Amino acid sequence: MSERTAGVGSLVEEVFREERGRLLAALVRRFGDLDLAEDVAADAVEAALVRWPVDGVPPRPGAWLMTTARRKAVDRLRRDQVYAARLALMQVEADRSGPATPTDTDGDLPDERLQLFFTCAHPALAAQDRAALILRCIGGLTTDEVARAFLVAPATMAKRIVRVKAKIREARIPFRTPEAEELHRRLPGVLQVVYSIFTEGYAASSGPELQRVDLAEEAIRLARILRRLLPAEREIAGLLAQLLLIHARRAARSGPDGEIVLLEDQDRGRWDRAMIEEGQALVVFALTGGPPGPYAVQAAIAALHDEAADVATTDWPQIVALYDVLLALTPSPVVALNRAVAVAMRDGPLTGLALLDELSGEPLLRGYHPYAAARADLLRLLGRFSEAAAAYRAAIALAGSEPERSHLRRRLADVHMRSPRS
Amino acid sequence: MKYMLLIHSAAVGESTDVPDEDLFNAWVSYDKAVKDAGIWVSGHSLADLTTATTVRVDPTGERIVTDGPFAETREVLGGYYVIDVPDLDVALDWAARCPGARRGGSVVVRPVAEFEA
């Protein structure tokens, strides 16, 4: 009996994790209130944990949860008339007189998550709050999990989420999918949030671990949801492709003690071939049918790395050409930095270093450790060891994660050893 | 839902490359658009900041009147609209159309608090 209960319990958890975003979006759509939607969604899951071990899992668990949650909402609005007055009570009442048995609800839950994406990624919200809210509302993470993901105290994260939900409610940020033109204006903002979640997981900006795989995988899951919701959008395919093509290297990216393994030293046999193939197919789609967007171009660059047998045989001329395209689409010092590194691989370290030195005045790169580290690497390759050491020291001072710092320290020790002075 | 659009213009005297007449016309047509849309609740343009006077009352109840404030930041509150629109997205659209959002100016959009009786 206890075994069966545990089995149903984990099934409920699984169903809930999959359905939570959908359930929440549908409830927000119905009631126009994120707090109410979250509360009754939680109530519905509690009810499922009680009912399902006794009655068995219903044939359409999502629909069961939705109907149960709607009833809880109606009960709550009946009790709290002031609250109810703010919402569309008549609509709720109409719903109450609807189908009595949960399984009567027709088909699957309607997928309203796209509007929730646009609300959570609204430009009127602070960038860090957008990511937290998307993980919480669409990713189905608990507040504690979101707090862990961003390395903040759970109470801090809880406060942030309360504050951002209050802004959505008080400033009346709408729950709606923008019309075609506005959708294309705002979609990059949504993709940016998913990408920022991935990069936070890929290279934790601080803390002891280099990678936080759960966050990277969460970003991939979100990108997959977006891809299903808007299958014609090539930039979504481009984003998903880029994430897959980078994440495919995760096993080779760090050594047994968590230390960084650079692209040039990675055991490419440990790259995830299935993930690379999926990414490659998406890149083709993202690049086809008109000028490519920035995510498609970045995915194409990642694909070229993934397809090469080693660094020496990587198609660097093609990668430089793609960085030229990217630089035209999204001019930024960071893209220029990456392009300079690719040029160094194509034409040699001296040419690359000249390009890096041209960027030395960029304020954005001054505090950016990859810039100092790239300079240091090229100086080391040129045998200019004391200059390299200075650049490594600058990079160490700027690096956020411990594995990155220890990698740079090893490089620093290496150039010290080779420096003629010592 | 009522929103106040607080229009912060670039400080007085800052040169713009737009002739005064064009700017004036832009304001006239924006004002007309707001009123034609049926969303206008109130709105005023404020006189120059150099005419402002500040009043404070200290803990003893004494009134302290001072000249100013003077612009310490580059932008100065130059006027406002209160509009009644369905949601923030619509309010942001109207803010973006406002001539005050251009040429170094900005428009701050704030929901008007509503208290239930």
Image (spheres, coloured by chain):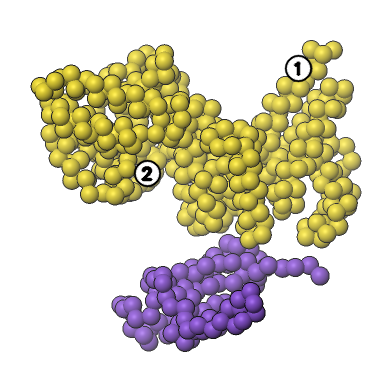
Chain colours: A yellow, B purple
Q: Chain of mark 1?
A: A
Q: Which mark is residue A302?
A: none
* Residue at the front extreme, as displayed: B60
With respect to residue B98, does A379 lie above or below? above
Say which of A58 and A256 sits in front. A256
Q: Residues within 10 Å of mark 1 (few under 14, many from 20)?
A: few
Q: Are marks 2 and 1 on the same chain?
A: yes
Q: Decide which of tag 2 and tag 1 comes sooner along the chain.
A: 1
What residue type is disc 2 on?
A: Pro
Find numbered disc 2 in the image and state the secondary structure of the residue it sits on.
Answer: helix
Image-quadrant location for residue A11:
top right
- Give percent across and percent down for residue A167: 63, 56
Q: On the rendered image, what quadrant is the N terminus of chain B found in? A: bottom right
- Give percent across and percent down for residue A351: 13, 36
Whether pointer 2 and pointer 1 mark residues with C-beta atoms closer than 8 Å, the reply is no
Image-quadrant location for residue B19:
bottom left
With respect to residue A141, does A29 lie above or below? below
- Give percent across and percent down for residue A373: 27, 32
Q: Residue at x 25, y 31 (%)?
A: A392
Q: Residue at x 35, y 27 (%)?
A: A405
Relative to B69, A296 lies left or right: left
The residue to which callout 1 is attached is A7
